[in-house]
Image (spheres, rainbow, N blue to C red):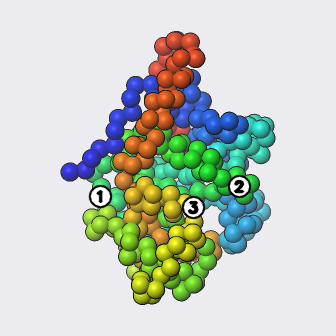
Amino acid sequence: MTKPAPRPPANTPSLDGAGFGELRAGPLGVRLAQEAWELEAAQALRYRVFYQEMGAKPTAEMAATRRDQDPFDAVADHLLVIDHALGEGPESVVGTYRLIRRPAAAKAGGFYSAQEYDIACIEAFPGEILELGRSCVDAGYRTRPTLQLLWQGIAAYVFRHRIDLMFGCASLHGTDPDALAAPLTWLWHNHLAPPALRPRALADRYVEMRRMDPARIDVRTVLNDLPPLIKGYLRLGGFVGDGAVIDQQFNTTDVCVVVKTDLVTDKYYRHYERRLRDALDSEPRAPAPPAPLETD
C-alpha cells in the first residue's frame, strides 16, 4: 500500500501563507512566482543558463526575446530564489524550478516528460504526483545554501499539496552517450526504478544506458561528476527510468528520475516545526487563515 504524504500540520509555513510571504535564509528567499514579471525573469534566467552558458539551441522567438519559454509555463507553478540584496526586480531572481501537478498537466495536454518517456505508470500512480523541471541557478549562486533553499521550497510545496511522488527529466551535459557511458551504466545498475514505477524512453528516442562493463566503472569519479541535481535526487532515494534520451536542443542526455516524497518530507519536517515555533514567538497572534498556494 502506498504511504500517503503527511498532512501539513496546522499553520505549517507555506510559500505564500498569511504571515509567510516566503521562506528566508539571510538575503535569499524562496517563493512562488505571482506576477508576470517574475515568470519573465525566470524565463530570462533559464535562457542565460541553458542557451548562453550550456549551449542549447534557441528557436528564433527565444533568441529574439532572450527567454526560454514553452506552453507548459502558462499552467505551471514557478519556484523562485530571490536575492534581496539585488533589489526587488527581475535582477533579483537567481534560481528557479518549474512545478507541474495533474490539473496543470491536464490543461497543457499532458506532462512535459511525456515528450521523452512513456510515463503511464507514473500517471496511474494513485497518489498526488508532481513533475519537476527547468531547474537552474545563476552561476554566482550555485552553492549549498541556495540549493538547500530550493529544496526547502519544494518540500513546503509537497507538504501543502500532499504530493506522494515526484518525477521529471534530469540532464547530463552533452549528446554523446558513449562519452557518458560510466554515469549512465552506473545509474542503470544501481538506481533503476522498480517495475511499477519505471518510465521507459519512447521507442524512437530510446538510448541504451548499459554501455560498459559495470566492473570497470570508477564510482568515485562518477559521483564527483554527476550533476548536483541528480545527486540530490539520489540522496532522497530517487530512481531512474529505463533508457536515456538525447535532447539536441538543450545539448543534453536526459534520464527520467522518480522520487517518492517520504524522505523529502522527513528531511524538512523538523525545519518547519522550528521555523513555525520561532515565527509564532515573534509575530502578533492575529488569527488569519493561510492563503491557498495555487497560483492559477
Badge 3 density bin: few <14, some 14–19, many ≥20, Cα 10 Å: some
- Nearer to me, 236 or 8: 236
Q: Provide residue 185's location: percent of width, then percent of height.
A: 44, 79
Q: Residue at label 1?
A: 124
Place of residue 290 in the rendered image (x, y in percent of width and height, measured from the top left): 48, 25
Across and down, in percent, residue 220 comes to 52, 73
**Side (left or right) of 210 relative to 152:** left
- In the drawing, does residue 83 fall left or right of residue 128? right
Q: Single out the mark in the foreground, 3 or 1.
A: 3
Q: In whole angstroms, how far apart are the C-alphas of marks 2 and 3? A: 14 Å
Q: Earlier in the sequence, mark 3 or mark 1?
A: 1
Mark 2 lies on a secondary structure that is: loop
Q: Amino acid at mark 1?
A: Ala
Q: Amino acid at mark 2?
A: Asp
Residue on which the image places disc 2: 138
Marks 1 and 2, the one that precedes in the sequence: 1
Q: Nearer the viewer, mark 1 or mark 2?
A: 2
Q: Residue at x 58, y 40 (%)?
A: 32
Q: Give the number of the disc on residue 228.
A: 3
